[in-house]
Image (cartoon, rainbow, N blue to C red):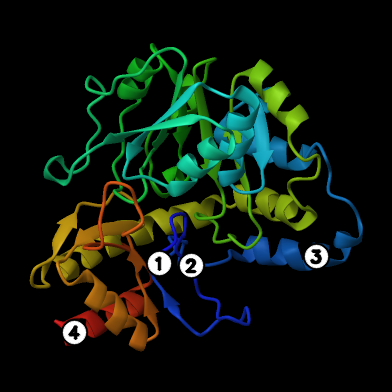
Amino acid sequence: MERYEHGGQIYDSDGRTGGWLDFSANINPLGLSEKILQKLTENLRGVVNYPDPNATELKRAISRRYDVSEKNLVVLNGAAEFFYLYLNVIRPARVVIPVPSFSEYERAARAAGCDVKYFFTNAAENFSLDVDKLKVNSSDCVIIGRPNNPTGNLISTEKILKLAEVASVIVDESFIDFLDVESARKFISEKISVVQSLTKIFAIPGLRLGFAVVEENLARRLNLSKDVWNVNFLAQKAGVAALSDENFLRRTRAWLEIEKKFFVERLNNLRGVKVFSPTVNFVLFRHEQAEKILAELRHEKILLRSCANFVGLDGSYLRSAIRSREENIKLFNALEKIF
């Protein structure tokens, strides 16, 4: 695998999708909500216009939904944009990344010319982060996934506040809406910035949409430094519709509570599999024959995520999204044939 390759590689050499059942990308299997679909349909002809450079309507919707001030917001073309934007503007001397974690943290840091230091967590401790052992200083920036991808770990806000006493902290809460837990957004300061994806929870990765909540002066700097039209017209409209759909979020959380339990039970029944307890809509697991499993599933047009290119993991680790019951049964029927 390439160093920074991601899941969701469903395209062939001609750029066409190949009819895959994709468990390699962690997208809400409930798909587009009717509110988003209706809003997109109503606004298709609006693409003849430039997007609102201030994303006024979208910022208002984010502010309402998450109880944050519009002055603290930066709207984004997907959460990943934030790492490049922040690190290019702030240029910290060193970026510390607890691993394994999302590879775009490192890619963005290296693109900004930052020194990168890994802090390795380990499987024996379920990849939990020991803040007391994480050595950082005031010139460092630490990037933490919450929940972390691919391990699913959910670091406490107390640990984040402790880290922020000695370094700047970027908290990536791209999957937080799948859970009913306290966000780190309420703790933003000069030392704590929080970024969130809207593409995963609302199943719109093809539109790209996210936002960051940061200290007001930093928000001003970042907004002046980004592409003025970074969030396209349809993405802005879809975001406004999505954030008004409380019922969709309730249905998603109810689905996940049931399906996560089913998925883990079936996975634990497979011989030789070590499962790391998930918090959200994906599961990390290990098997000595992981590469064989990947290859044989591909013959069935099913994709899992190899974790061979995650720093801190190797080719024996796999990550799977949790999808609908029908799709999950197809996966486990295929896995049971292999085993």
Q: Is residue 130 visible?
A: yes
Answer above or below: position of 265 versus 254: below
Q: Which mark is residue 8?
A: 2
The residue at 64%/38% (across/down) is 62
Q: Is residue 65 visible?
A: no
Q: Secondary structure at mark 3?
A: helix
Answer above or below: position of 162 versus 38: above
Q: Amino acid at mark 1?
A: Ser
Decide which of 300, 289 is in the foreground and name it. 289
Q: Amino acid at mark 4?
A: Ile
> Counting residues from the N terminus, which is met first, the one under dot 4 or under dot 1?
1
Q: Amino acid at mark 2?
A: Gly
Residue on which the image places disc 3: 42
Q: Nearer the viewer, mark 1 or mark 3?
A: 1
Decide which of 104, 49 is in the foreground and name it. 104
> Counting residues from the N terminus, which is met first, the one under dot 1 or under dot 3?
1
